[in-house]
């Protein structure tokens, strides 16, 4: 009878140890996230910049390292807009190209993705400037995904 009690206690102890080990150890299942094959360069930063007033000009933002950027533009206004990327130089705003485009038109309540073509943006201060087909109540957002070179 003593042996049965001792074996029962040992069996319970082993079961508890096995359950604790399973609860503490990391899962053995592979992660559910799958990499996107066309994004070869490592992801660095996502930044949002936009305007929701009558100026059409976004707030300024800095790029501290040379970087390759992808732009996603959302036009939330009920009129078409044309967006330009501008870089500050000698206290003046100069138009800069956006992956080969001097300006981008986005239809009312629509969006546009500008894929990176290898264009690299240098250190400096940038902003977006929009003009519209009608009205002056701008409401747009540009999400920039920056990649290390």
Image (spheres, grey):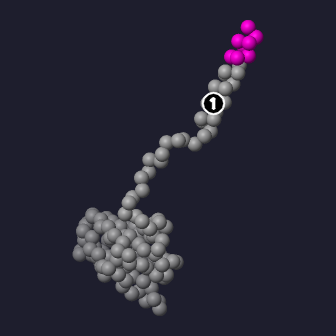
Residue drawn at the location 64% of the way across and 25% of the way down: 15
Q: Position of residue 85 (x, y in %)?
A: 37, 79
Q: In this orientation, which residue lies closer to the viewer: 35 or 146?
A: 35
Tell me what residue is drawn at x 70 percent, y 21 percent.
10
Q: How far from the left and from the top, in percent, is residue 59?
A: 44, 75
In this rendering, the answer to whether 32 lies above or below 90 is above
Residue at image mark 1: 18
The quadrant of the picture occupied by the N terminus is top right
Q: Quadrant of residue 54?
A: bottom left
Q: Is residue 135 left or right of residue 149?
A: left
Q: Position of residue 81 (x, y in %)?
A: 28, 73
Question: Which residue is more in the foreground, 70 or 128?
Answer: 70
Dot 1 lies on which element? helix
Q: Is residue 5 part of the magenta span, yes or no? A: yes
Q: Which portion, as a residue range, is magenta? A: 1-8
Seen from the viewer's position, the closer of residues 46 and 147 is 147
Q: Is residue 132 magenta?
A: no
């Amino acid at each position: 009878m003593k042996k049965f009690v001792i074996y029962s206690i040992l069996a319970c102890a082993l079961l508890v140890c096995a359950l604790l080990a399973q609860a503490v150890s990391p899962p053995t299942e592979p992660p559910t996230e799958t990499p996107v094959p066309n994004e070869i360069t490592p992801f660095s930063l996502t930044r949002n910049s936009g305007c929701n007033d009558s100026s059409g000009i976004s707030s300024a933002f800095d790029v501290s390292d040379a970087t390759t950027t992808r732009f996603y533009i959302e036009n939330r206004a009920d009129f078409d807009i044309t967006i330009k990327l501008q870089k500050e130089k000698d206290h003046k705003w100069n138009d800069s190209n956006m992956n080969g485009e001097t300006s981008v038109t986005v239809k009312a309540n629509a969006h546009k993705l500008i894929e990176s073509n290898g264009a690299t943006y240098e250190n400096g201060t940038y902003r977006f400037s929009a003009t519209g087909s009608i009205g002056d109540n701008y409401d747009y957002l540009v999400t920039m995904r920056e990649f290390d070179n």
